[in-house]
Amino acid sequence: MNNRDFKEFAPGGIYHIYNRGNNKEKIFFDEQDYRAFLFRLGLSLGFTEEELNKEKLTALPYSRIRITKMEKGAFNLYAFCLMPNHFHFLIEQIVDMPISKLMLKLCTSYSRYINKKYKKVGHVFQDKFKAVLIKGDPQLMWTSSYIHMNPVKDGLVKHPKEYQWGSYNDYASDRNLPIVSKEFLLETFGDTKNFIEQTLNFDVKARL
């Protein structure tokens, strides 16, 4: 893809954001880690603890997390996938606050969590996150499919519906995580049926 590691963020821009563990090491070790990351992501997107705790995947009761509350609606998360040693987001910046600020809050908080839980020191993530600017509907749909088929590509599951740590089931089933804004992507694909067909027909051997 073109414009790899694009860092001139601007309102209205949609970006494929991704990062992996330092030295390609794991960043998620158990279910609690995935939920801790999604909970922090939700807080960074401006959702309240009460909203996040209504869904099992984003719930983290009795949290002592301190993240400065972001403005709700400052960013729209259209797709995500958390893999054992990396993550992907498809996200739109709505306001002047750059996505880099959201990512700094999220990754700093999660790194502290991991280092404390596993008695580690040093970097959890590899350098800075990467960003690719989305320039049109074909690239948007390709990136959505790439993100949602990542667990299939890496051999973790045979079908994306079997993988709970991505947003596929928020589009293809009745799951409704508060952090996922679905309308825009569904409008781009046309409807749920076309979203499912194009996602499942995606070439899992495709590379960024």
Image (cartoon, grey):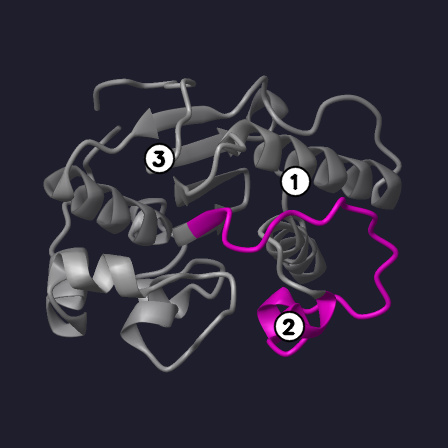
**Badge number at residue 15:** 3
**Badge number at residue 34:** none
- Residue type at mark 2 is Glu
Q: Residue at x 22, y 64 (%)?
A: 186
Quick one: quadrant of the C terminus?
top left
Residue 154 belongs to the span the image colors magenta: no
Q: CA distance from mark 1 to mark 3?
A: 16 Å
- Residue type at mark 3 is Tyr
Quadrant hosting residue 48: bottom right
Quadrant hosting residue 154: top left
Q: CA distance from mark 3 to mark 2?
A: 25 Å
Residue 74 image offset from top left, x and y in percent = 51, 47
> Horizontally, is 67 left or right of 96 in the view?
right
The boundaries of the magenta stretch are: 49-76
Q: Residue at x 56, y 20 (%)?
A: 128
- The residue tagged with tag 1: helix, strand or loop? helix
| Residue under pointer 1 | 106
Front one among 190 and 208:
190
Residue 159 seen anywhere in this rendered image of the structure? no
In the rendered image, the vertical position of residue 57 relative to residue 157, given as above or below = below
Quick one: quadrant of the N terminus?
top left
- Nearer the observer, disc 1 or disc 2? 2
